[in-house]
Image: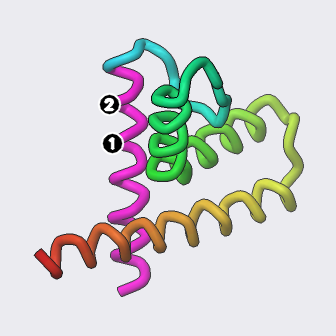
Amino acid sequence: MLAFCAALGFASAGTISSFYQLVTSQRADFSFPGTSVSAAAVTILINMFAGPFILARTVLAGLRSREIRALPALAAAVIAGMWSSLAGIFYLSLVLNS
């Protein structure tokens, strides 16, 4: 069940990140523009729900360029996996309670 929730959360994070890139022509990342309150709120929501995908993409890029070692990459993978699991549980609870 946890693996299903993790897969659901990661797939949703990838979809949200890709949709953000389609709409804005910029990759979703953890930067904070701080231009207005509404932009800050949207950035927080995007990062909250697309975060596992953004984290995994950033770590993979760091591994390819050899900027990140194996142990921090493993820690980031565990964090992204747990984050995806929690997001998947949230999405599943929304579907089951409606």
Q: Residue at x 46, y 45 (%)?
A: 45
What's drawn in magenta, residue-wise?
A: 1-22
71 or 86, nearer to the observer = 86
Is residue 14 placed above or below 86 in the rendered structure?
A: above
Crowd rating for badge 2 (residues with CA inside 10 Å; few <14, some 14–19, many 20+): some
Kind of residue indicated by mark 1:
Thr
Q: Quadrant of the C terminus?
A: bottom left
- Magenta stretch containing residue 75, yes or no? no
Q: Residue furthest top?
A: 25
Q: Residue under circle 2?
A: 19
Q: Quadrant of the N terminus?
A: bottom left
State the SS at label 2. Answer: helix
Q: Residue furthest front?
A: 37
Crowd rating for badge 1 (residues with CA inside 10 Å; few <14, some 14–19, many 20+): some
Q: Residue furthest left?
A: 98
91 or 37, nearer to the observer = 37
Q: Residue under circle 1?
A: 15
Residue 17, quarter of picture: top left
User: Disc number at residue 62?
Assistant: none
In the rendered image, residue 90, in percent from the top left (x then y), is placed at 36, 72
In the rendered image, residue 80, in percent from the top left (x then y), is placed at 60, 60
Residue 60, quarter of picture: top right
Q: Residue at x 34, y 76 (%)?
A: 4
Instruction: Report the Cα–Cα distance between label 2 and label 1.
Output: 6 Å
Q: Residue at x 51, y 51 (%)?
A: 48
